[in-house]
Image (cartoon, rainbow, N blue to C red):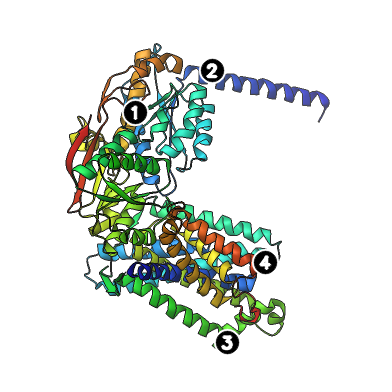
Amino acid sequence: MDIFLQQILNGLVLGSVYALVALGYTMVYGILGLINFAHGEVVMVGALVSLSVVELLLGTNLGLPALLLGVVALVVAIGVCMALGFSIERIAYRPLRRAPRLAPLITAIGVSILLQTLAMLIWGRRYHTVPALIPPTPHAVAGATITNVQILIIVVSALIMAGLMGLVHFTRLGRAMRATAENPVVAGLMGVNINRIISATFVIGSALAAVAGVLVSSNYGVAHYYMGFVLGLKAFTAAVLGGIGNLPGAMVGGLLLGLIESLGAGYIGDLTGGFLGSHYQDVFAFLVLIMVLVFRPTGLLGERLSERA
Amino acid sequence: MKEGDLSVHLKTAVVGAAAALALVLSGCGKKDEAIKIGHAGPLTGPVAHLGKDNENGVRLALDEANAANIMLGGKKATFAMQSEDDQADPKQGPIVAQKLVDAKVAGVIGHLNSGTTIPASKIYHDAGIAQISPSATNVTYTHQGFKTAFRVMANDAQQGKVLGDYAVHKLGAKNIAIIDDRSAYGQGLADEFEKAAKAAGGQIVTREFTGTDKTDFNAILTSIKGKNPDLIFYGGMDSQSGPMMKQIKNLGIGAKFLTGDGGQTAEFLKLAGDAAEGAYASSPGVPLDKMPGGKAFAEKYKAKFNIEIQLYAPYAYDAANVLLEAMKKADSTDPAKYLPILAGISYQGVTGNVAFDENGDIKGGSISLYQAKGGKWEYLDTVGG
């Protein structure tokens, strides 16, 4: 039983991160109908920038408390990623807004490769060790263990998702975002500054990506220029699973994918008597995705179009 | 402009161009053409730090050869490295191999991973060019009947056998969990380990799998925790085993941890942090400070590149040197002439004596064992050889 609980916890931690990153994909898709493949790289930039800030501050020997150090690093990472998200949209997507749909898809992939290569030049190829600012003491919860960082991941993700829902549903900006998602032309006629709304969407999504990057790298204690790729792919899958363009869908999709992966890897071997091993983890996750899409092509929550943001 | 003018201009231009071409050509002829030595390894991607390390080893060997004024066929030989990025991707292996063959390299040092080395070896074999891998340890590489394939490191069969034996007899493991990363190296090592551990009387409670791009192992580790092993063996590289070690400790798993040469690195210790304490790892050959020329090599490397050796650089250096030695002895860079000499060579390198058996495997490859203590790899023992 404790093993099962542990797998659920593993899945929740993994899923919270997927959900956080998936929100960025889904917000942009909801408004522009564009898949921002560079989003995973923004997560990576967030992780590496925060790492550099922490290393810089540790190097100055000011004796700052670990918590303050973490907060400063997080704030800088969020700032850099917001600027990055804003620039990506201005440079790679805005000039192509009226181009055929394939064009921005290609620039998205181009930006992704560009950012990866730039990061490789700036931070090098090696795996960076992320200093543990929060002591990684495992806590025992009914026979399972969870570390401080993992608790933080679940709590922060939940808070951010709640905050984002509030933003989209109860603020002027949120209303403008929903209006733009519904019909950009009409929203424009009604006095919504569409360009500003789209920029805001990218900036908010990138801030979430920065948070995700910092959380992921401190959880595993590793950051490297390649980390955004697989994470981005998984988060994109989560967004599609939940219904791309739909905010609660991204959250449900993220958590579900995390749980499927974790339980899949943990139990496939035992359930099939060793015939299929844990290397079928991803196969299993994508099989679920295909099944969902066959029966619900819009994803799990994909039909409630009015909720798009 | 009159017609006559044009033709005059045209004539001058043609004569001028011809003269320029002749100059360039004669220039080429007079200058000693550099002899190209190929290097292939991952220069981008998750194990790029190890690829660059190997490249540095080869560069050091070639620079020294150039400074030593080696004469080949009565001319001073200059060596130039052509380094290609195989991204540690088995699909890229043959592509960059073909690129090196097309560039007419005289010999190749590489590749780094078994997964790229094996498919690439066919290309070098067909082109008749010698290939010496500094670090590919999968058994298959030298067992395809290719007379062009060599390696300067003990293979997985040798290493896995030693590790399986060691786990059961020296570490007292009875119930063993095995994880591998599904790469040719990781899987090959884990297979050999499993065989040897079973033969020594150990019981394999589970075999789990992960991938070379993963950082989250909580699910498989939790599943392993439920089976209560007293030793976990990992076949794979440090970029996975480092974070894995952390997660093992966080999940409160008390089992001993043992891994192969892919984890016996400074990077593993950094990535695992405090959690590395007590981990066991092996490495083919002997430790740098126990190599005959280890200390001097480390100093040279540090002086030239201003970074620490990651892992296989001494082997890449020896591989390059043994290739150059064969060329020197044959007085030729023609593979047909130097290959028979390479096969029978005995060369004293920094890692020890380099001589090949009939397959191209290094003779008397020994395996050393280490344990992580206080943020360092402490040398335990050398087995085999």
Which residue is painted at 26% across and 61% down in the image? B253
- Distance between mark 3 and mark 4 Cα atoms: 24 Å
Tell me the amino acid under the disc marked 1. Answer: Ala
- Distance between mark 2 and mark 1 Cα atoms: 35 Å
Q: Secondary structure at mark 3?
A: helix
Image x and y of residue A124, in percent: 39, 51
Q: Residues within 10 Å of mark 3 (few under 14, many from 20)?
A: few
Q: Which residue is mark 4?
A: A97
Which of the two discs, 2 and 1, labels the residue nearer the N terminus? Answer: 2
Image x and y of residue A290, in percent: 60, 62
Extreme-top residue of the structure? B74
Give me the chain letter of mark 4. Answer: A
Q: Are marks 3 and 2 on the same chain?
A: no
- Distance between mark 2 and mark 4 Cα atoms: 56 Å
Quadrant including the C terminus of chain B: top left
Give me the chain letter of mark 3. Answer: A
Image x and y of residue B263, in percent: 30, 47
Give me the chain letter of mark 1. Answer: B
Q: Mark number for residue B341? A: none
Tell me the amino acid under the disc marked 4. Answer: Arg
Q: Are marks 1 and 4 on the same chain?
A: no
Q: Mark number for residue B26? A: 2
Q: Can you say whether A298 is above or below A189 in the image?
A: above
Q: Is residue A86 visible?
A: no
Foreground pick, B309 / A94: B309
Q: Mark number for residue A172? A: 3
- Distance between mark 1 and mark 4 Cα atoms: 54 Å
